[in-house]
Image: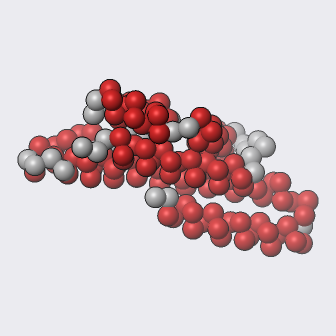
Amino acid sequence: MLVKTRHIASLVEEVIERAAENYPADRAFLEAAFSGYLSAMAYAEIERNVEKILSERFGAINDEKVAHFISETYGKKQGRIQKSDIANLAKQFGENCKSQFNDSVEGRSATFYTNLLQCRHNLAHGEPENETLLTAKNGINAAEVLLTALKNSIQR
């Protein structure tokens, strides 16, 4: 689901490996900086995927005009992508959808996802702390778990 982010992550990993060969002392800084960059990319791609999942679901409504209205009203610019925000989007389809979503996301995935969002926050509002490339990679995997859980939870 996060195709672009995964592609960039593989390129970043190559860059860090090459740089570390010549400047091993810079590895920690590079990983922290690039993990922030990857988390920002993932954040944007997650937003687009949430919008796409909602729009596809709304498109399944038999009345084209109603589906378009709902998609334009609720499928765009959600802006918030914390796990609880995504769970609340699922809840708008019914309490059972929220329960299914939450049941589909293990605690470990939720933690990795939260770490990814925190990494992005640290980059945007301060500076990277102790993030590594693994923080971003685990977070990207977890984000895909959440997106799949959202998609599955709101299906008919």
Residue depicted at x 88% and y 71%: 21
* Camera-side residue of 72 and 59: 59
Marker count (numbered): 0
98 relative position to 109: left or right: left
On screen, 20 above or below 33?
A: below
27 relative position to 57: left or right: right
Percent of width and height locating residue 107: 59, 35
Percent of width and height locating residue 68: 16, 48
33 relative position to 120: left or right: right
Residue depicted at x 11% and y 43%: 66
Percent of width and height locating residue 139: 61, 48
Residue depicted at x 43% and y 49%: 148
The residue positioned farthest toward the top in the image shown = 95
Percent of width and height locating residue 87: 42, 33
119 relative position to 24: left or right: left
Residue depicted at x 64% and y 68%: 10
Query: How is the rendered protein coloured?
Result: secondary structure
